[in-house]
Image (cartoon, grey):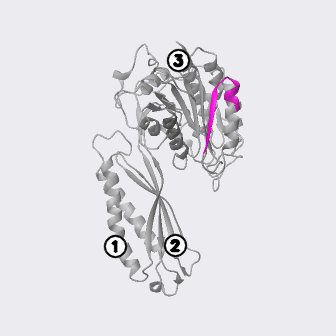
Amino acid sequence: MAVEGESPDRIRLTDPPRASIDRDGPVRFSPAMSREHPELSACKDMLAHLVAFDTVSHRSNLAIIDDLAERLEDVGARVDIYSDETGEKANLFASLGPDGDGGLVLSGHTDVVPTEGQAWTSNPFAVVERDASLYGRGTCDMKGFLAACLVMAPHFAARPLRRPLHFAFTYDEEIGCLGGQALVETLARKGVRPAVAIIGEPTSMRVIDGHKGCHEYSTTFSGLAGHGSDPEAGVNAVSYAAHFVGQLGHLQRQLKKRAPADSPFNPAGSTINVGALQGGIAHNVIPDTARVDWDFRPVQPSDERFVKEELQRFCDTELLPAMRRVHQGGSISTQALGRVDGLMPMQDNEARDLVMALTGANRTDTVAFGTEAGLFQGLGLSAVVCGPGSIDQAHKADEFIALEQLSLCLEMLDKLSAQMAA
């Protein structure tokens, strides 16, 4: 994709709300829906179509990417598809309007979290409508936003856009923003330079200008197997993994005390979460391997150094010496699986100002969960998170999105198309 020319002017707002941002003032995140958006019925159908693609992260997303590409090409978009090294996953980057720098990106991920072990009352991949809501895996996180973008794409295509409009649909966000990282690297390498990114994660259409980063790790313990009747003859990897989990809990309590007094986040400080401890094969066998899956969400760089140094000290001076007194081959290794950049609140943020004007919000907020917004910010874009649905419904059985939320999102995109052509 060739990108040429000077950057267009910023989208001009009649009354930029920058000075009115107040995290402690009365909340008005978006106007109440006074009517259904005319495209709501089409959006419902589109969402049902997208949910029917089983795009749980460990599966390929190529089928849904091909479908999205065909629909965007049908309205005249210039579409690029970038596959990963396996050929089983791909990102889509599509553009409407003029070529050049300074474009606006509407971004969302195509993958969803698993449904196994959850008590769904209906087929997760077949949308069910009840109580003015749509139920199904991904309805909220975040195919609702993708559906709204696709339904509104013809409206954008029909207008004389003053600057490029891009659609960025990625893979494997749920397991570490892997597709988003690959996409921003591709854009940087190709010299594609958008200026603004709106990431449509579920925020109940609130305007989010900051969130924590997220670092995901797996720590593996190798011990010595043996008969459970003589515990001291082996090195119980599960037991040492449990001690490691205890240290993570201790560090979490320390991080709470280290929280900045002026932190905009909730929880205020950096956090650690243990997601899984796996190991062992039977009641009477000393397990020789175990793994702890955990994540760390920093609010300040000093906390990252603190956690890494304390864990290294604990392993080197306490756990490993005890393991190796019995078995010299005992080991502990940590693998970094994903690193999601945080979105830092910025004084000058065109994306925030624009979305506040479009939604009628009078303030912004921060959230604890991670998104791809920090990746775009790292590429030099102004970025904001705003999308339909509540994060409270995400990742759960009977995930749903309220029809009102979809209508509000459609309204925002409708206004955006008018702004971009004004």
Q: Nearer the viewer, residue 92 or 120?
A: 92
Residue labelled with disc 2: 289
Q: Which residue position holds label 3?
A: 420
State the image coordinates of residue 201 (x, y, percent, origin top left). Answer: 53, 37
Q: Are marks 1 and 2 in contact (CB under 8 Å)?
A: no
> In this rendering, does residue 48 appear at all?
no
Residue identifier under label 1: 318
- How far across and down, in percent of the image, does residue 302 sit? 30, 50
Q: Position of residue 74 (x, y in %)?
A: 71, 25
The amino acid beneath tag 1 is Glu
Q: Is residue 265 above or below residue 197?
A: below
**In what quadrant of the picture does the N terminus appear?**
top right
- Three-letter code for the amino acid on which mark 3 is drawn: Met
Horizontally, residue 22 falls left or right of residue 339, namely left
Q: Earlier in the sequence, mark 1 or mark 2?
A: 2
Above/below status of 266 relative to 422 = below
Q: Earlier in the sequence, mark 1 or mark 3?
A: 1
Give the percent coordinates (x, y) of residue 209.
Answer: 42, 33
Report the mark closest to the observer, 1 or 3: 3
Residue 378 in view: yes
162 in relation to 345, above or below: above
In the picture, residue 283 is in which quadrant? Answer: bottom right
Gap in angstroms between the C-alphas marked 2 and 3: 57 Å
Q: Residue at x 32, y 60 (%)?
A: 309
Above or below for 83 versus 362: below
Look at the image and give the residue range highlighted in magenta.
70-83
What is the distance, in whole Å, between disc 1 and disc 2 at their CAs?
18 Å
Find numbered disc 2 in the image and state the secondary structure of the residue it sits on: strand
- State how far apart marks 1 and 3 are (Cα): 60 Å
